[in-house]
Image (cartoon, helix red, strand yellow):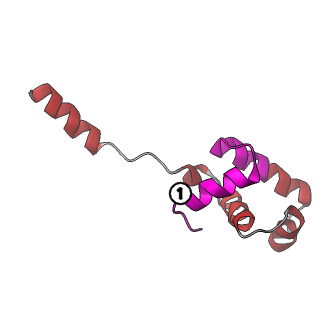
Amino acid sequence: SSAIARKVVEYFQQKPPRLEAETLTKREQEILARLAQGYRDKEIADLLAISLPTVRTHVRNIYERLHVRSRAEAVARFLTSGERL
């Protein structure tokens, strides 16, 4: 029917949903990329010239935004999203 056809057209005209990594701030993306490379919090703090507590705050924010509970989950989301920051 025309009503169904209209709904199908509207569905495909919608903006694609944002990738989860796009909801992260630039700094959070930098930190997540470093986590994916295997860096520890202290190493990330030294590389980015920020304090260790700041890194840990960013990591907690990453967990919340990506809806994960661990570094492994966050890194897995990062790697499977196809994003390369």
Which span of residues is magenta-colored? 59-85
- Left/right placement of residue 4 relative to residue 83 reads left
- Residue on which disc 1 sits: 81
Question: Label 1 neighbourhood size at 10 Å, few (<14), some (14-19), many (20+)?
Answer: few
Q: Magenta-highlighted stretch: main secondary structure?
A: helix
Tell me the element at label 1: loop
> Which residue is at 68% across, 65% downward?
33
At x 90% / y 59%, what residue is drawn? Answer: 52
In the image, taking residue 55 as reference, residue 73 lies left or right, namely left
| Residue 30 position in % (x across, y down) | 69, 65
Q: Is residue 61 above or below residue 43?
A: above
Above or below, 49 against 20 in this view is below
**Per the image, is 63 magenta?**
yes
Give the amino acid type for the residue marked by disc 1 in the picture: Ser
Please give left or right for residue 13 compared with residue 70 in the image: left
Return the x and y of residue 1 as percentages of the image width and height.
Answer: 9, 27
Looking at this view, is 9 or 77 the one in front? 77
